[in-house]
Amino acid sequence: MNHSASKTIHVCYAHRLQDHLGECKNLHGHNGKVVIHYSSPTLNYKTGMIVDFAEIDKRFQLIKQLLDHNTILQDNDPLVEPLTKFLNDNHLKVPVVLRTPPTAEAIAQFIATSMRPCPDRVEFWETPTCRGEWSR
């Protein structure tokens, strides 16, 4: 038997998929939903929890500050350099740059592997009907 706890957090972001054959090749934005899951075969004896929801919020806070109201691009995207310069010059958030196309699956992996301790599973909902997932 396994116990689980999850926390849902929302982020607004822009991205583009350079090699996509459809509209996603253009820079566009989403109101994303992140669901962070932790699981354990046992509960903490004193608290009766796997992890406190407030603790999940703390663990996610730096990543939320990085992703929310920001642009996520692939490292070879020609927009990275001029957009970074423009944003730096105007004291705005510089883009988050991933080694892979910034798909929902890749963003879920980025979130999971950036958190300490790493969650057991992260769902990244790009839209209300489309999600990517990363799990151990």
Image: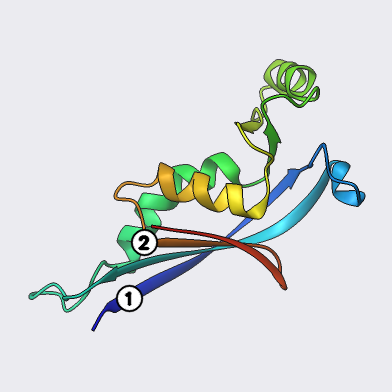
Q: Mark 1 and mark 2 in contact? Answer it, CB < 8 Å.
A: yes
Give SS at disc 2: loop
Residue under numbered circle 2 = 120
In this rendering, the count of numbered labels is 2
Residue 110 x/y as whole percent: 51, 44
Give SS at disc 1: strand
Going by the numbered disc 1, the residue's amino acid type is Ser
The answer to whether residue 31 is above or below residue 76 is below
Please say which color scheme the image uses: rainbow
Residue 117 badge: none
Residue occupying image coordinates x 17% and y 76%? 43
Residue 27 x/y as whole percent: 84, 41
| Front-most of residues 108 and 96 | 108
Going by the numbered disc 2, the residue's amino acid type is Asp
Disc 2: CA contacts within 10 A as few (<14), some (14-19) or many (>=20): some
Task: Name the quarter where the N terminus is drawn.
Answer: bottom left
Disc 1: CA contacts within 10 A as few (<14), some (14-19) or many (>=20): some
Q: CA distance from mark 1 to mark 2?
A: 9 Å
In screen coordinates, is 106 left or right of 73? left
Residue under numbered circle 1 = 4
The disc, 1 or 2, on the residue closer to the chain's N-terminal end is 1
Residue 91 x/y as whole percent: 66, 22
Task: Name the quarter where the C terminus is drawn.
Answer: bottom left
Tell me which corner region of the image, top left, top right, bottom left or bottom right, holds residue 80: top right
Residue 5 x/y as whole percent: 35, 74
In screen coordinates, is 130 left or right of 117? right
In screen coordinates, is 15 left or right of 136? right
Residue occupying image coordinates x 40% and y 71%? 6
